[in-house]
Image (cartoon, rainbow, N blue to C red):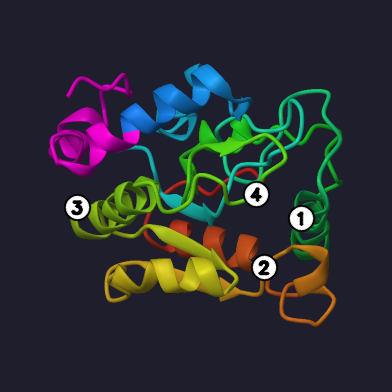
Amino acid sequence: MNVIIADSWKPYLQPEFDKSYFPKLAEFLRQEYTTQRVYPPGKLIFNAFDKCSFDDARVVILGQDPYHGEGQANGLAFSVSEGITKPPSLINIFKEIQDDLGKPVPKSGNLERWAEQGVMLLNSTLTVRAGQAGSHQGKGWETFTDAVIKLMSEQKENVVFMLWGAYAQKKGAVIDESKHLVLKAKHPSPMAAQWGGWFGNKHFSQANEYLVSKGLPPIEW
């Protein structure tokens, strides 16, 4: 099956595209994009792969669903398009960066600048119906993104994986912790963060310290 995805990823992911589940997923998406309002726009479904090449990826942040509000999702986990109000989870992420690294909260919630530095912002499910969280779960995306995580664990070394919340931590169970750094915390959503375990996790400074220790450039968060 010919899927339009960044050239750096295609040799690694072609075996997934050729498996029986993927054409079924593609047909489901064709129907959804034809008959429903679906986010992100079709051209941004694989934006996480387009903005962060396989070779450059040195941090992976796992999300769950794309945002399902008007104009929010841009194909990068936790990120929103320019000019869109920052969602609560993203506000809490920026607050933690401010506390951890002393950086001011940016005006824009667009995280493309992270992706272009090698941060893979990967949602478990890459599409969603407008206003219907979880509506594209169980259609094949999770199988695909599980394969992406396993691939990165096996084919790369010294990657920082940030797993926020029980869902991401379960999904990250395949990561080889002997060759990568796995950082775990509560989810940054307000409901989870208020019970403790998000603020003060210092994932961003820990990630940079690890990268530098491996001779890799730190991320400008």
Name the residue: 71% across, 34% down.
80
**Quadrant of residue 199 within the rendered picture:** bottom right
How crowded pointer 1 is (Cα within 10 Å; few <14, some 14-19, many 20+) is rated as some
Mark 1 vs 2, N-terminal side: 1
Mark 4 vs 1, N-terminal side: 1
Residue 163's spot in the image, x, y percent? 52, 66
Name the residue: 31% across, 19% down.
4
Please give the range of residues in magenta. 1-25
Distance from disc 3 to disc 2, alpha carbons, whole Å, reads 27 Å
Given contact means CB atoms under 8 Å apart, are the residues at marks 1 and 2 in contact?
A: yes
Mark 4 vs 3, N-terminal side: 4
Q: State the residue position of label 2.
A: 187
In the rendering, which numbered label is found on residue 155?
A: 3
Is 69 placed left or right of 206 in the picture? right
Q: Nearer the viewer, mark 2 or mark 4?
A: 4
Is 211 placed left or right of 188 in the picture? left
**Is 128 covered by the magenta stretch?**
no
